[in-house]
């Protein structure tokens, strides 16, 4: 049953700092949040005047990629070469497995 309270749809700078595992003062020091936008593709604030506010779903996606405890992303395509049959006999066996036996 709904409680009547709405979940916040924005993050403050302090929220982002905590999500990244730092104290809120860390993100304000030397305007580190602007460095995150410039260097780490952090989304721009939706409210930029006064206290910046950030769109929560967008920030959740960004935090999923940049969170210090997130698993490191791997390449989607495997770059290891696929083993190739080395002889005509191996090729015949390979094609028989893939396409089935052909009757002549």
Image (spheres, rainbow, N blue to C red):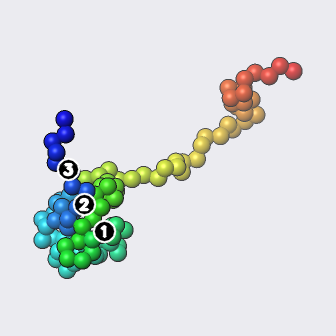
Q: Badge 2: how crowded within 10 Å, few (<14), some, or many (20+)? A: some
Task: Please report the residue visible at 30 percent of the width from the left and 68 percent of the height from the top.
Answer: 46
Q: Badge 3: how crowded within 10 Å, few (<14), some, or many (20+)? A: few
The spot of residue 39 in percent (x, y) is 35, 73
Task: Please report the residue visible at 16 percent of the width from the left and 77 percent of the height from the top.
Answer: 29
Q: Quick check: marks 1 and 2 in contact, CB under 8 Å?
A: yes
Left or right: residue 36 compared with residue 78 = left
- State whether residue 91 is above or below residue 16: above
- Give the residue furthest to the right: 104
> Which residue was labeled with disc 1?
46
Q: In the rendered structure, which disc, 3 or 1, sits on the residue that comes first in sequence? A: 3
Q: CA distance from mark 1 to mark 2?
A: 9 Å
Q: Secondary structure at mark 3?
A: loop
The spot of residue 30 in percent (x, y) is 19, 80
Which marked residue is nearer to the observer: mark 2 or mark 3?
A: 3
The spot of residue 97 in percent (x, y) is 68, 26
Q: Secondary structure at mark 1?
A: loop
Instruction: Tell me where residue 19 sits by quadrant.
Output: bottom left
Q: In the rendered structure, which disc, 1 or 2, sits on the residue that comes first in sequence? A: 2
The spot of residue 52 in percent (x, y) is 23, 71
Q: Secondary structure at mark 2?
A: strand
> Which residue was labeled with disc 2?
10
Mark yes or no: residue 93 visible. Answer: no
- State whether residue 5 is above or below residue 27: above
Q: CA distance from mark 3 to mark 1?
A: 19 Å
- Give the residue furthest to the bottom: 30
> Which residue was labeled with disc 3?
6
Q: Quadrant of the N terminus?
A: top left
């Amino acid at each position: 049953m709904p409680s009547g309270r709405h979940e916040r749809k924005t993050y403050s700078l302090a929220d982002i700092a905590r999500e990244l595992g730092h104290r809120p003062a860390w993100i304000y020091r030397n305007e580190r949040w602007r460095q995150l936008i410039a260097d780490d593709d952090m989304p721009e604030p939706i409210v930029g005047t006064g206290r910046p506010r950030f769109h929560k779903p967008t920030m959740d996606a960004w935090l999923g990629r940049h969170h210090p405890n997130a698993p490191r992303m791997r390449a989607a395509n495997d770059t290891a070469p696929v083993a190739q049959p080395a002889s005509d006999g191996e090729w015949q066996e390979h094609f028989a497995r893939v396409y089935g036996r052909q009757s002549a």
